[in-house]
Amino acid sequence: MSRRVLLVEPNYKNKYIPLNLMKLSWYFRRVCGDDVRFFKGDLKHFAAQLLLEEFFHGEVDKQNLFAPDKNNAAQKFGRHEKILAEFIRTGKKILLEAVPNLRGDFFYEDALAELHRRFKAGNFPTFDIICVNSLFTFFFDETVRTINGVKKFLVDGGKIFVGGVAATLVPNFFEQATGITPHRGLLDKPTDLGKTDDTIIDMLPPDYSILDEIDYKYPAADAYLTYTTRGCIRKCPFCAVSKLEPEYKDHVEIFSQLRQIESQFGARRNLLLMDNNVLASRKFDEIVDEIIACGFGKGTTYLPPDEYTITLKNLREGFNDRAYLRKMIRLYDELEKKLPEELAGKFYAMREKNFLLSVPSATAEKFFEPDEFVRPLFEKYFKRKLLTRYVDFNQGLDARLIDEHKMSRLAELNLRPMRIAFDHIEQQEIYKRAIRLAAKYGVRDLSNYLLYNFTDTPEDFYNRLRINIELCEELDVSIYSFPMKYCPIDDPKYFGNREYIGQHWNRKFIRAIQAIINATKGKVGRGREFFEKAFGKNLDEFRELLFMPETFIIYRARYEDNLTAQWHEKFLSLDDAERLEAEQIIAANKFSDEDISRVTSEKIRDVLNFYLVRR
């Protein structure tokens, strides 16, 4: 018997697709034959949407208050689904005034009123199994709210499973907050989630169709996201990999998985590899060969798939109608905007006749009938162009393991960017050698992660950034640095926030760095002039920037010739004892008229008053 399965990602912003939920979708849908649904967003809106679907396609309650023909309500009111969902959520009757032919029809009004009552009572449609993903620990509160929120959607006797990164790192805290014991680690055992078959969920291809069930758009959705290895040979104290993937696996085969994805969902442009240390693999050469065989060798290109054909194919096969009805309506909407006026009119008339103007009223069969008319339009107005495709070892490469052979093999790939970590100033010679090898083998687009706020000093951080600027000039390469602030991942005082301050740092320094890199969207590019403007020409200027009022850092151009110059003059005029006292106050990064008035030195107060300036 088919079960109803709900997969949920909490309502936080994230770049990458929820790989573990997508593999679970493939398992429940393909292996078990279950009815699978994915949601990311506000659970109240989800509840209203589920209840609205009952209005369109089912019974409102057990008393058969509303049991229309399957598509009657959907055909009448499907185009107004957002308004009707808002009414179910809020009960504001004025909303119904905007829905033609609804006011005065007491049958439908009563049905909607009953659904609003159910919404208020928390009487929502239910699921047999609910799986909730977790990501970073600083999303702990939002994830807990989501876990507790989905309990209203669980059928009596149903099961809720919680897993993912944060759930693995701090499982006890999730259990205390939700009463649910999380699944820890990967889904790499036959007994995971209490199942009895021998399927290894982690080895399944991800179900990309679920991404079309929701409004949220993942920036990296047009990529194969996978692993060619698991784990890491290092046990760095700042890193969670040893807990998330404790066993190092030399090779995870990806060729067949990518081919399955291409066959079912269409090819992806890029290959996003989440390996934590691919260079440690004894099968590194096999991995490179496999990546090339998958179509990501140097110079390879990619023709985007025909989305219309793929969507129609999956509708014919009955593969996730919920997703592909939404996608086809979106494709129809995009096509209609491209058509000349007269043809657009004919196209609209066809849609109206076949109830293909909205998702609730659409059925898969109605898309098959006009295919002869529609397909040539998509071929004419949706031009597909060859694109270069790229490989990205997103978690970074270990500079300590780079040698001539490995770099020559990496250079056989369409690698962009090559990411190399530079977490410690003590590794600068190893790092420089790795960058010079990359340049030698023609790799010119590089990126690196710079950990700070750990055991490093601000001076270490500045020097690592400056080394990148100098390497760019020396080798004529492009290196983008991504500063990453360290925060303990399992300390209960800090894992739910980002407030940890390293031993050589303080609140003001952290805020100053964040203010600088926020202006560059989190990255620091090549170019000496820009770097020296942003971070200072030398360590003395950098240190002064760290103490500069935050407003003057953010609005550099507005203030640098007036208030910033005045602050700088007064700050430098302090003697050693006054400077030490002022810096201790500034380091706390808390400024108010009351606090400043308690400072006895007039010269220090004159400096501190600049920190009260806002926009």
Image (cartoon, helix red, strand yellow):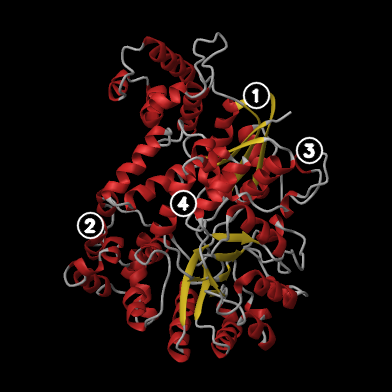
Instruction: Check disc 3 and give the amino acid type.
Output: Gly
Whether 270 is drawn above or below 106: the answer is: below
Between the C-alphas of marks 4 and 3, the distance is: 45 Å
Asked which quadrant contains residue 573, the reply is bottom left
Which one is in front, 226 or 471? 226
Mark 2, Cα crowd under 10 Å, few <14 / some 14-19 / many 20+, is few
In the displayed structure image, the side of residue 597 where residue 501 appears, left or right: right
Tag 3 and tag 2, C-beta contact below 8 Å: no
Measure the alpha-carbon separation of dots 3 and 1. 18 Å
The residue pinned by badge 2 equals 613
Q: Residue at x 51, y 77 (%)?
A: 446
Q: Which residue is mark 4?
A: 375
Where's residue 29, x and y in %? Answer: 68, 41
Q: Secondary structure at mark 1?
A: strand
Answer left or right for 518 relative to 131. Answer: left
Which residue has dot 3 on it? 194
Secondary structure, mark 4, is helix
User: Is label 4 in contact with label 3 (beta carbons under 8 Å)?
Assistant: no
| Residue mark closest to the camera, 4 vs 1 | 4
The answer to which of marks 2 and 1 sits earlier in the sequence is 1
Q: Which residue is mark 1?
A: 155
Q: Considering only vertical position in the picture, is 555 above or below 338?
A: below
Callout 2: SS? loop
Query: Is the Cβ of the residue at disc 3 closer than 8 Å to that at disc 1?
Result: no
Q: Amino acid at mark 4?
A: Arg
> At 45% across and 21% down in the image, what residue appears?
72
**Mark 2 and mark 1: Cα distance apart in space:** 55 Å
Residue lying furthest left in this view?
A: 562
